[in-house]
Amino acid sequence: MTKIETEYPKYIRIDRSLKKKYLESLAEKPVSFFSPSSNIGTQLYFYAVVIGSKLGIRTKSSDPEDLRLYIELSDVQKIVLRAIVLKENNYDLDVLLDGKKTLKIIEEYANGGLPILWEMATNKQNEELKNELCELLGMDK
């Protein structure tokens, strides 16, 4: 954990109703593109944040719920999430010093992207979903 991160809230959060409606449903769905593991919720959350950011969809939580400890995110996930926050704030590095603001932006993008991810996962075949996500996220297929 970096010195900056010691000032961050302990948990990443998501709106309780979105978690129940979308995240829990996706975590139970057998989609081979998502690696089955004990941290499937974190993987889905990460994809939802990236999708929300890419599409510019931020949704405030009406009833936020703790999802996972921030420190449990991988280093790569943290870097990508911080890059999203930097872009959102015109690359002002000072925003990263405000952990509460940083994680609030991430939460809002997760809330915005989760319904899109759910829609994609429920209406696509695995290969079609993988291709669409890779294209949306700018990744190689």
Image: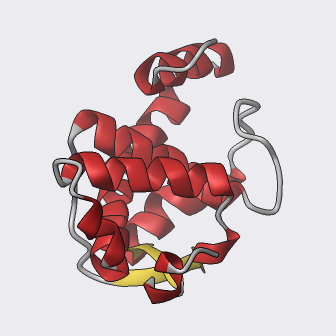
Residue 71 placement: quadrant? bottom right
Between residues 125 and 62, which one lies in front from this camera angle?
62
Residue 141 x, y percent position in the rendering = 63, 12
Question: For the image shown, how many numbered marks are present on the structure?
Answer: 0
Residue 15 placement: quadrant? bottom left
Q: How is the image coloured?
A: secondary structure
Between residues 2 and 66, which one lies in front from this camera angle?
2
Residue 25 placement: quadrant? bottom right
Residue 9 visible in the current orientation: no
Q: Is residue 53 above or below residue 133?
A: below
Residue 35 visible in the current orientation: yes
Q: Residue furthest left?
A: 90
Residue at 31% x, 83% y: name it: 63
Q: Residue furthest right?
A: 37
Between residues 63 and 29, which one lies in front from this camera angle?
63
Residue at 64% x, 75% y: name it: 1
Relative to 56, is 41 on the left or the right? Answer: right
Residue 19 x, y percent position in the rendering = 47, 67
Residue at 53% x, 58% y: name it: 23
Residue 6 x, y percent position in the rendering = 53, 86
Relative to 40, is 118 on the left or the right? Answer: left
Residue 66 x, y percent position in the rendering = 50, 83
Between residues 64 and 92, which one lies in front from this camera angle?
92
Relative to 30, is 52 on the left or the right? Answer: left
Q: Is residue 120 above or below residue 127?
A: below
